[in-house]
């Protein structure tokens, strides 16, 4: 799957740069935002990085519900990256 290749590339780059990180895959029947917000608290994260893609003209101005929930509910700083 495409996401597995991308995830492996991120893992390799973080390791090469000596950046402490943990990667977890969750399949719990909850929304991605719920899983991420729980993980932030569980691991006492210092920073959460999320990716977000532009979709439509309206999508550029309004975040998706998961990204919005994460940005509003996180107990640590969130870095949201936008892909073209």
Image (cartoon, rainbow, N blue to C red):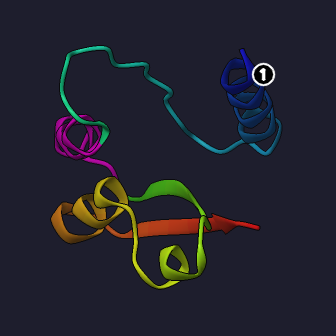
Q: Identify the image quadrant of residue 67.
A: bottom left
Q: Residues within 10 Å of mark 1 (few under 14, many from 20)?
A: few
Q: Residue at x 50, y 56 (%)?
A: 49
Q: Is residue 39 left or right of residue 50?
A: left
On screen, residue 45 above or below 38? below
Residue 69 position in % (x across, y down): 22, 60
Residue for badge 1? 5
Residue 59 position in % (x across, y down): 50, 73
Q: Residue at x 59, y 71 (%)?
A: 56
On screen, residue 42 above or below 41? above
Q: Main secondary structure of the magenta part?
A: helix
Q: Is residue 39 left or right of residue 57?
A: left
Q: Is residue 21 left or right of residue 35?
A: right
Furthest residue in direction bottom, as rendered: 61
On screen, residue 11 above or below 66? above
Look at the image and tell me in which quarter the C terminus lies. bottom right
For this rendering, which residue is in front, 10 or 68?
Answer: 68
Q: Secondary structure at mark 1?
A: helix
For this rendering, which residue is in front, 18 or 62?
Answer: 62
For this rendering, which residue is in front, 25 or 59?
Answer: 59
Q: Residue at x 22, y 46 (%)?
A: 37
Look at the image and tell me in which quarter the N terminus lies. top right
In the rendered image, residue 73 lying in the magenta stretch gets the answer no
Residue 51 position in % (x across, y down): 56, 55
Q: Residue at x 34, y 19 (%)?
A: 26
Residue 2 position in % (x across, y down): 74, 23
Q: Identify the image quadrant of residue 18.
A: top right
On screen, residue 46 above or below 81? above
Residue range highlighted in magenta = 33-45
For this rendering, which residue is in front, 48 or 52?
Answer: 52
Q: How many numbered circles are shown?
A: 1
């Amino acid at each position: 799957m495409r996401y597995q290749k991308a995830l492996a590339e991120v893992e390799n780059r973080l390791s090469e740069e000596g950046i402490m990180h943990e990667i977890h895959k969750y399949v719990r029947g909850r929304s991605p935002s719920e899983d991420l917000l729980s993980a932030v608290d569980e691991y006492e994260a210092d920073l959460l990085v999320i990716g977000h893609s532009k979709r439509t003209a309206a999508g550029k101005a309004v975040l998706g519900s998961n990204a919005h929930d994460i940005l509003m509910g996180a107990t640590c700083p969130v870095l949201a990256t936008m892909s073209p």
